[in-house]
Image (cartoon, helix red, strand yellow):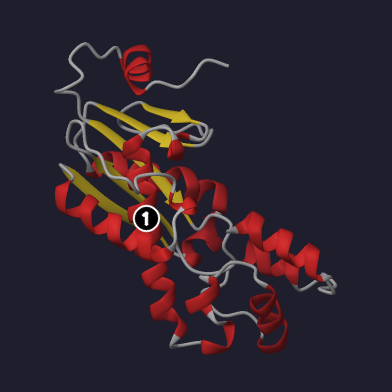
Amino acid sequence: MPRFRLTTYLRDTFGVEDLKSFRLCGMDEVGRGSYAGPLVAAAVVLPPRFRHPLLRDSKLLSARQRELVGEVIRRRALAWVVAEISAADINRRGLGWANVEIFRRLVDLVAADGYCCDGRLRINASHTVHCLVKGDNLVPAISAASIVAKVHRDAIMTAMHDHAPHYNWASNKGYGAREHREAILSHGPHPQHRTVFIDNLMQLDLTFDAPQAAALEAAQA
């Protein structure tokens, strides 16, 4: 498989001739696999030749690293914006709808010459959006968006923790950690929970051995 080159990607995908003046908007979401809380996505337009040693997929960074590079991105980006879709809207209209709708909203909020996002989606937006599998670790603007979105959502979940501490959202950020699943079964679901996961959870026998639980939590992080 040929090595990914950003300049080749921009030329082949967007027909870019002048790479220095092309404003690429990278977009990424976080929280799609979470049991609770909003879906969050960010859009970022980086300045030409932006570099940072920590600029990569947010899942490959620690919380402290994400906060450090996130602050630099927000300060130096030509444009950046964050969008949210609430758990209530996800419950009403579905996670599939939310995952596309959030990118449609971001496109309308950021002026750019081209738009790209991580994943494999069909996004009918006001401008064409190119989706790239593993784009969050290949395209710097998408990596930046993944970091900004992750920092923003983690802050939301940490704040929500104070209103329902038994779910320990400050630690698990709403994902399906063992303690979170057990708290749902003990205390019942919260309005911030997503029925797409909770309805299934309430019907399952949650007797996992340690390796199974660890594998599930790693897959959902």
Place of residue 181 in the rendered image (x, y in percent of width and height, measured from the top left): 69, 75
Point out the image quarter for the N terminus. Answer: top right
Where is residue 91 drawn, in percent x and y?
56, 63
Residue at 19% from the left image edge and 24% from the top image edge? 22
Indicate the quadrant containing the C terminus: top left, top right, bottom left or bottom right: bottom right
Residue at (85, 74) in percent of width and height: 207
Quarter of the image for residue 28 reads top left
Q: Nearer the viewer, residue 217 or 43?
A: 217
Residue kind at label 1, given as amino acid type = Ala
Asked if residue 82 lies left or right of residue 85, the reply is left
Q: Total label count?
A: 1
Examine the rendered structure and indicate whether residue 90 appears above or below residue 187: above
Residue drawn 71% across the image and 68% down it: 199
Badge 1 crowding class, 10 Å Cα cut-off, few under 14, some 14 to 19, many 20 or more, is many
User: Which one is in front, 201 or 118?
Assistant: 118
Apparent side of residue 169 relative to residue 186 in the rendered image (left or right): left
Residue 21 shown left or right of residue 92 in the figure: left
The residue at 17%/15% (across/down) is 18
Vertical comparison of 174 with 96: above or below: below
The image shows residue 99 at horizontal and vertical percentages of: 49, 47
**Residue holding disc 1:** 149
Up the image or down, 14 lies above or below 152; here it is above
Residue at the extreme front: 53
Query: Where residue 198 sits: x, y (%)?
Result: 67, 69
Question: On the image, which quarter does residue 13 sit in?
Answer: top left
**Helix, strand, or loop for circle 1?**
helix
Q: 213 left or right of 73?
A: right
Q: Nearer the viewer, residue 8 or 44?
A: 8
